[in-house]
Amino acid sequence: RYCRKERKFKPDRAHYCHDLQRNVLRMDHYCPWLSNVVGYYNHKYFFLFVFYTACAAGIVDVNLIATLMHGGYSAAATFMMAQGSFVCSAVEVFLAPFCVFHTWLLANNITTIEYCERKPQMRRQYDQGLVANIQCVMGRYAPEWFF
């Protein structure tokens, strides 16, 4: 395929990023919170960031709610724990579905851009099976998937 913006040939699954003004291999999306493009070289770290943040928010929220239900704290401490629980719940409400969606994308070996192009035949074009799809992003050695 030929990129008209860079005026050179580009590999499959590469997309032009207007923010970086260059093609990015296996571009998933531009993330304004990371101020970077999620692509071939950092997709694993983006996924782990979303996954661990969702897990941490859920764990903290459950513990704060359990502590609040136990009671026996001053008004100031109770108020601060309630605020913390509210923030963790808000993060979890928005981040959990996002994490589930990206887990599904990872399991099917497609990027967000490929999903949004709405071409069903393209969505299955790179599917190699569950384990191989995960290995494409997370690496071949399973114990390193979580680091």
Image (cartoon, helix red, strand yellow):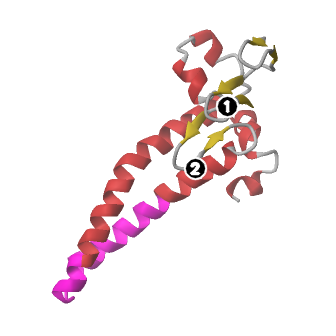
* Local crowd size for mark 2, using a 10 Å CA cut-off: few (<14), some (14–19), many (≥20): few
Give coordinates of residue 67: x percent, y percent: 29, 78
Relative to 61, does residue 33 appear above or below in the rendering?
A: above
Residue in the picture at 35% in, 66% down? 61
Dominant secondary structure (helix, strand or loop) of the stretch shown in magenta: helix
The residue pinned by badge 1 equals: 27
Q: Does the magenta run of residues contain 75?
A: yes
* Image side of residue 141 versus residue 47, left or right: right
Residue in the picture at 81% in, 50% down? 141
Give coordinates of residue 83: x percent, y percent: 26, 69
Figure quadrant of the N terminus: top right
Give coordinates of residue 98: x percent, y percent: 46, 41
The residue pinned by badge 2 equals: 34
* Secondary-structure class at tag 1: loop
Relative to 88, does residue 121 appear above or below in the rendering?
A: above
Magenta span of residues: 55-79
Dividing the picture into quadrants, the one containing residue 106 is top right
What type is the residue that disc 1 sits on? Answer: Met
Residue 103 shows in the view: no
